[in-house]
Image: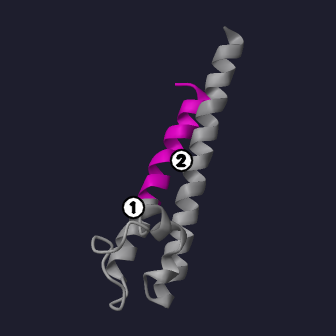
């Protein structure tokens, strides 16, 4: 296994775990005055909930959810960058 693949796998799964944890906490601390997102308009989608959790959850949980979402997205971006770097190195070597 190349180094880029190891970095990709090493950060991809923790990043996914952090994003899933953020979604779980979002569901757990959903505000009662906001309709569940199955009943919301088309505007409310997963990306809006991930980017703006304070609109949908209680304030004490919003900071933790935002940190989890940002950390997960950062790890996924690092994993993709490492994967593309490995691909570029393979193409350059060939």
Q: Quadrant location of residue 23?
A: bottom left
Residue at the image position 58 percent from the left and 64 percent from the top: 70
Q: CA distance from mark 2 to mark 1?
A: 14 Å
Q: Which type of secondary structure does the marked residue at label 1 adopt?
A: helix
Q: Which type of secondary structure does the marked residue at label 2 adopt?
A: helix
Label 1 crowd bin: few (<14), some (14–19), many (20+), radius 10 Å: some
Give the left or right position of residue 31, taking residue 91 as reference: left
Query: Would you place residue 52 above or below residue 74 in this image?
Result: below
Residue 50: x %, y % from top left: 49, 67
Q: Where does label 1 land, which residue?
A: 20
Please state the extent of the stretch shown in magenta in the rendering.
Answer: 1-18
Residue at far top of view: 94
Residue 65: x %, y % from top left: 49, 74
Q: Which of pointers 2 and 1 indicates the residue nearer the eye?
A: 1
Residue 19: x %, y % from top left: 45, 61
Task: Name the residue nearer the viewer: 4 or 63.
Answer: 63
Residue at the image position 38 percent from the left and 75 percent from the top: 25
Label 2 crowd bin: few (<14), some (14–19), many (20+), radius 10 Å: many
Q: Where does label 2 land, which residue?
A: 11
Give the left or right position of residue 88, taking residue 80 as reference: right
Residue at the image position 54 percent from the left and 31 percent from the top: 5
Whether residues under marks 2 and 1 lie with C-beta atoms below 8 angstroms apart, the answer is: no
Query: Would you place residue 82 above or below residue 90 in this image?
Result: below
Residue at far right of view: 92
Q: Quadrant location of residue 74?
A: bottom right
Disc count in the image?
A: 2
Q: N-terminal of the two: label 2 or label 1? A: 2
Task: Inspect the magenta stretch and tell me whether residue 3 lies in it.
Answer: yes
Provide the major secondary structure of the magenta segment.
Answer: helix
Task: Name the residue nearer the viewer: 53 or 13.
Answer: 53
């Amino acid at each position: 296994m190349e180094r880029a693949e190891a970095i990709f796998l090493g950060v991809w799964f923790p990043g996914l775990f952090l994003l899933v944890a953020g979604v779980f906490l979002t569901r757990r601390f959903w505000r009662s005055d906001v309709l569940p997102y199955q009943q919301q308009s088309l505007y409310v989608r997963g990306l809006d909930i991930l980017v703006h959790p304070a609109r949908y959850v209680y304030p004490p949980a919003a900071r933790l959810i935002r940190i989890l979402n940002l950390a997960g997205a950062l790890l996924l971006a690092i994993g993709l960058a490492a994967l593309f770097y490995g691909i570029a190195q393979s193409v350059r070597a060939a």
